[in-house]
Image: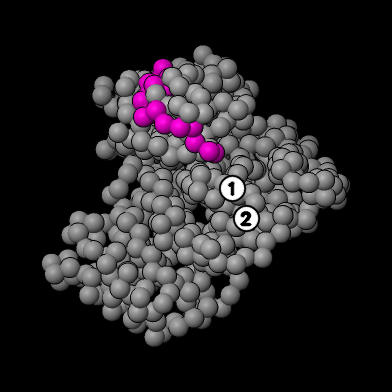
Amino acid sequence: MANIMIQRGSKGEYVFYLPKRDLEDGIVSMEFDTPEKWGGEIKLNNGGCYYIEPQPAPARLPISLRAKRLDAAE
Amino acid sequence: MSALTREESEALIQEVLEVYPEKAKKDRAKHLAVNDKSIEQSKKCITSNRKSLPGVMTIRGCAYAGSKGVVWGPIKDMIHISHGPVGCGQYSRAGRRNYYVGTTGVNTFGTMNFTSDFQEKDIVFGGDKKLAKVMVEIEGLFPLNKGISIQSECPIGLIGDDIEAVAKKTAVETGKPVVPVRCEGFRGVSQSLGHHIANDAIRDWVLPRREGKAFEGTPYDVAVIGDYNIGGDAWSSRILLEEMGLRVVAQWSGDGTIAEMEKTPYVKVNLIHCYRSMNYIARHMEEKYNIPWMEYNFFGPTKVAESLRAIAALFDDKIKEGAERVIAKYQPLMQAVIDKYKPRLQGKRVMLYVGGLRPRHVIGAYEDLGMEVVGTGYEFGHGDDYDRTIKDMGNATLLYDDVTGFEFEEFVKRVKPDLVGSGIKEKFIFQKMGVPFRQMHSWDYSGPYHGYDGFAIFARDMDMTLNNPCWGKMQAPWLKKAEPEEAKKAA
């Protein structure tokens, strides 16, 4: 489990930030992206894949979360 | 000499790597690259923020340097105790030239060194008692201090002292903030982790102190973050922001005070100059207090104008007009500077190797003077720094991460830049090689270089160094070839 931060990029897309690895990357896809259910498997631009517990969509971004690494790039 | 082509640059890197043993060669190869503007992500071409190889001459610092020297040190009305043996604090004392206003030793303490001066018995029996005693003495001798930070040196972490407990106890006794910072030098690969630890300490111990208290704000409140006022940099930046109608609530941390930092959660925008050392706290404030942040660049008139407009775009028309007014006011002054120095500096080539933001931020200032940056690198940059750098650098220029002494010398010998910009450790090597050199950490005891006023000084300093007559006197007179007879007769 790693602490991550999800924020909005300049074009309104989700951006993933992992401070420990200094990894900042765009999110290509998020499994659930509705107001009631949000999260699940997220795929990054660099090919990495993380999992955040599905939850109601946060009121505002950025938000710090715990994420599980499913498949890291490199 | 014209610039190297891509093939030549690549061949040069290979040639430099040739001297290393197989394993070291493989490792170093990842840190050297030829710039390609088309690459989106830097990690495809360069690796950064990795442990330096044992045995090479690295130019990096430690976590203590990042915390005490960079982030905490410039906060002028706090006393920063270098907790541990005396050397770490004494040899870095006042070396960074963070200017401040105040009476040193009375209400400001920036250039003083406070240390708990560990001895053998403190290592054996623990130094907590001594630390508590030091803080009592400080309260007696310097009653106008506004707080204390405890900057740990290596032994504190090794012997496992509980500085947090001492800090909490003393804070209750004195009623002032006492901040323990776990920035032992052995943490991390460079000073970069020290910045992060220092940011985390500010987040946990400083920012919550004024939560819920009244603050008389305006819609134009901003904080200048990551400007350490080296040679007065923050002052020459601040006047521009104030002139365009903004109110600068806090300076982090050059000429800054703890009260300013506590008030930062009330500002409207955080303006980040040194992204590397302060982005952590900006991200935290964005999440917790909903304060947007943006990076700006105050080196050279082109970038200053660009940044002023970008900052103004976040505010209403009054500020936008203010920005245009400031730009229009300084434009003729800057044109005069460029007219004076550009003919003397046009076409000169520069190689840089500095720390957090300058390897990419000063490129614009050099370009304003008609100079070209042909190589750049970070001591402790991360991937996101290189992402930003690739766009600013020309194609086929050299990028070097955590460059070793040997590599840097070889690059300079082959690329033959007209100017090298780096730190004091590199200065005399290159000057003895006959290459003009400017210190780009401390501005060679000059400055400020930020803002419009700073650019005039920057241009003068570059001219003074590059066109100094001493560079024509590198050969002893008796070693010079005799002038041909005809030439003498003609004269």
Q: In the rendered image of this protein, does residue B233 appear above or below residue A35?
A: below
Secondary structure under the numbered disc 1 in the rendered image: loop
Q: Nearer the viewer, residue B284 or B140?
A: B284
SS for dot 2: loop
Q: Which residue is drawn at 47% across and 70% down?
A: B78
- Quarter where residue B357 is shown: top right
Mark number, residue B291: 1
Establish if B20 lies above or below B161.
above
- Is B437 situated left or right of B322 in this image? left
The correct choice, above or below, for B84 with respect to B489 in the image is below
Question: What residue occupies the far top of the structure in this picture?
Answer: B7
Total marks shown come to 2
Q: Mark 2 points at which residue?
A: B267
Quarter of the picture holding the C terminus of chain B = top right
Expressed as whole percent of the image width and height from the top left, the position of residue B93 reads 43, 65
Q: Can residue B416 be seen in this view?
A: no
Q: Is residue B443 left or right of residue B490?
A: left
Q: Nearer the viewer, residue B359 or B298?
A: B298
Residue B181: tell me if it is visible.
yes
Q: Which of marks 1 and 2 is nearer the N terminus?
A: 2
Tell me the subunit letter for badge 2. Answer: B
What stretch of residues is rendered in magenta?
A41-60
Name the spot of residue A67 as percent of width and height, x first. Answer: 35, 31
Q: Does the magenta stretch include residue B415?
A: no
Q: In this view, does A42 lie to the left or right of B234?
A: left
Chain letter for mark 1: B
Q: Are marks 1 and 2 on the same chain?
A: yes
